[in-house]
C-alpha cells in the first residue's frame, strides 16, 4: 500500500458528518484527464486529451454549483502513468476537493476493478461526489450501485468482445463465407478462381465507371457468362447449378462484399458461448472492424469504394441505361 492509498484508508476510517459537503457551498471540483483508456483507442494522445477537456468544460459550464479547483492531466501511458492519479487521491484525502469530474470512467484509474473499489469506498462512504460526463452519471443524484453494475457489464462485454475478436483474427474462412471468384479447399484454404476473378474485376470496373447493377447482369447473361458453376456446386450441389444466374441482386451482393478487398466480416456473435448482440450493445459500431483474411484481394480499395458509391447512388436515382447504351458507354469505354 503506497502513501496515497494509506491516506485514503485513514480518511475512510474517520469519515463522519464533518466530511460531508456543506450546504450552500460550491463543490470544489477536481477534473481528471488521462491519456490511457481501459479498452484502447485509435486516437492520438493530444486528441484524447482535447476531447476529454472539451467534455469536462461543457459540464462545468452547465453546472454553476461546481467550482473547478484543479485539473490533473495524466499524459504518461507507461510505468509512470499514475503520477497525476496519486496526486488526485492525495488531494481527496486531504479534503482539498470534494468532487471528481471525468469525461468517462474508462479514463479513470488503473482498471475497472480499481475504479469500482474506489467508487464504493470513497465516493459511497466518504461523501465525495463523482461525475461521469459520458454516462451522464452524478453520484449526488443517481444510484451508485446501479452505476457500478453498469460499469461491470460494460467491462465484461468489452472483454468478451476483445477475446472474440482475437479468435476472429486467427480463424480460417468457412465454406459459406467464400464468394464467387474464389475456391474453398478443405482446411480453410482459399484459392483464386482465375476465370471467375476476371469476371469479378470487370464487374467492379464497370460499376466504378457508373454501370447499373441490372445492366451489368443483363450484359453477362447476354454473353453467356455462367454464374459461379463451381461455387454453386460446392454450396448447393450439382442440381442447383442451372437454377442460378446473374441478376441485379447478385451483382449488388458481390459489390458490397468486403471479401474481395481481402477482408472478412467478423462472426463474433455467431461463435458458441459468446454473448449475444443485446449483451454487446455497449460496444460502439465503429469498433466492430473487419479483420484481414488469408485470401488474396481481387480489387483495390479505390475501385471498391467507387463501385460501392455508384451502387448506393443508383438505389435512389435509378441510373439504368439499357443494354445497348450500357455496352456503348460503359463496356467499350472502360479500360481493364
Image (cartoon, rainbow, N blue to C red):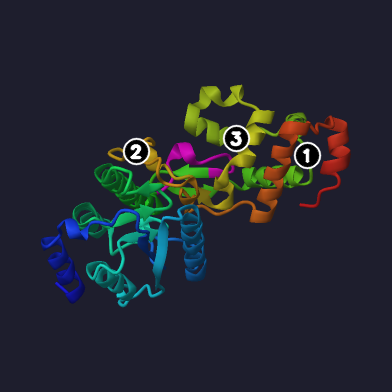
Is residue 158 left or right of 257 when viewed as pictured? left
Image coordinates of residue 305 in percent, x first then y, are: 67, 49
Residue drawn at point x = 48 percent, y = 33 percent: 234
Q: Position of residue 328 (x, y in %)?
A: 88, 39
- For the magenta stretch, what is the residue range? 172-182
Question: Mark 2 near mark 3, Cβ–Cβ under 8 Å?
Answer: no
Whether residue 180 is in magenta: the answer is yes
User: Residue 129 appears in which quarter of the rendering?
Assistant: bottom left
For residue 26, above or below residue 184? below
Residue 147 in picture, x, y percent from top left: 30, 45
Q: Secondary structure at mark 3?
A: loop
Asked if labels 1 and 3 touch by Cβ distance under 8 angstroms, the answer is no
Q: Is residue 112 above or below residue 137?
A: below
| Residue 27 visible in image | yes
**Callout 1 secondary element:** loop
Is residue 278 magenta-colored?
A: no
Amino acid at each position: 500500500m503506497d502513501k496515497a492509498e494509506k491516506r485514503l484508508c485513514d480518511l475512510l476510517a474517520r469519515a463522519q458528518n464533518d466530511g460531508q459537503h456543506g450546504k450552500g457551498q460550491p463543490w470544489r471540483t477536481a477534473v481528471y484527464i488521462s491519456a490511457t483508456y481501459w479498452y484502447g483507442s485509435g486516437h492520438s494522445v493530444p486528441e484524447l486529451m482535447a476531447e476529454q477537456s472539451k467534455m469536462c468544460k461543457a459540464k462545468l459550464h452547465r453546472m454553476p454549483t461546481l467550482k473547478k479547483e484543479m485539473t490533473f492531466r495524466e499524459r504518461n501511458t507507461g510505468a509512470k502513468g499514475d503520477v497525476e492519479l496519486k496526486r488526485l487521491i492525495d488531494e481527496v484525502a486531504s479534503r482539498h476537493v470534494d468532487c471528481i469530474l471525468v469525461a468517462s470512467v474508462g479514463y479513470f484509474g488503473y482498471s475497472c476493478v480499481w475504479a469500482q473499489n474506489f467508487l464504493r469506498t470513497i465516493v459511497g462512504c466518504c461523501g465525495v461526489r463523482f461525475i461521469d460526463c459520458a454516462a451522464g452519471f452524478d453520484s449526488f443524484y443517481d444510484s451508485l450501485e446501479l452505476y457500478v453494475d453498469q460499469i461491470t457489464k460494460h467491462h465484461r462485454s468489452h472483454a468478451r468482445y476483445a477475446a472474440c475478436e482475437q479468435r476472429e483474427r486467427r480463424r480460417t474462412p468457412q465454406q459459406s463465407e467464400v464468394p464467387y471468384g474464389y475456391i474453398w479447399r478443405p482446411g480453410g484454404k482459399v484459392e483464386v478462381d482465375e476465370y471467375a476473378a476476371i469476371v469479378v474485376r470487370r464487374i467492379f470496373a464497370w460499376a466504378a465507371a457508373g454501370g447499373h447493377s441490372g445492366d451489368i447482369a443483363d450484359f453477362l447473361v447476354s454473353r453467356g457468362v455462367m454464374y459461379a458453376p463451381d461455387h454453386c456446386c460446392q454450396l448447393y450441389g450439382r442440381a442447383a447449378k442451372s437454377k442460378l444466374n446473374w441478376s441485379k441482386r447478385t451483382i449488388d451482393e458481390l459489390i458490397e462484399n468486403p471479401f474481395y478487398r481481402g477482408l472478412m466480416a467478423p462472426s463474433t456473435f455467431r461463435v458458441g458461448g459468446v454473448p449475444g448482440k443485446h449483451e454487446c450493445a455497449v460496444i460502439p459500431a465503429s469498433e466492430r472492424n473487419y479483420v484481414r483474411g488469408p485470401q488474396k484481394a481481387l480489387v483495390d480499395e479505390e475501385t471498391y469504394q467507387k463501385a460501392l458509391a455508384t451502387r448506393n447512388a443508383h438505389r435512389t436515382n435509378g441510373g439504368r441505361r439499357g443494354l445497348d447504351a450500357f455496352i456503348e458507354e460503359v463496356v467499350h469505354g472502360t479500360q481493364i
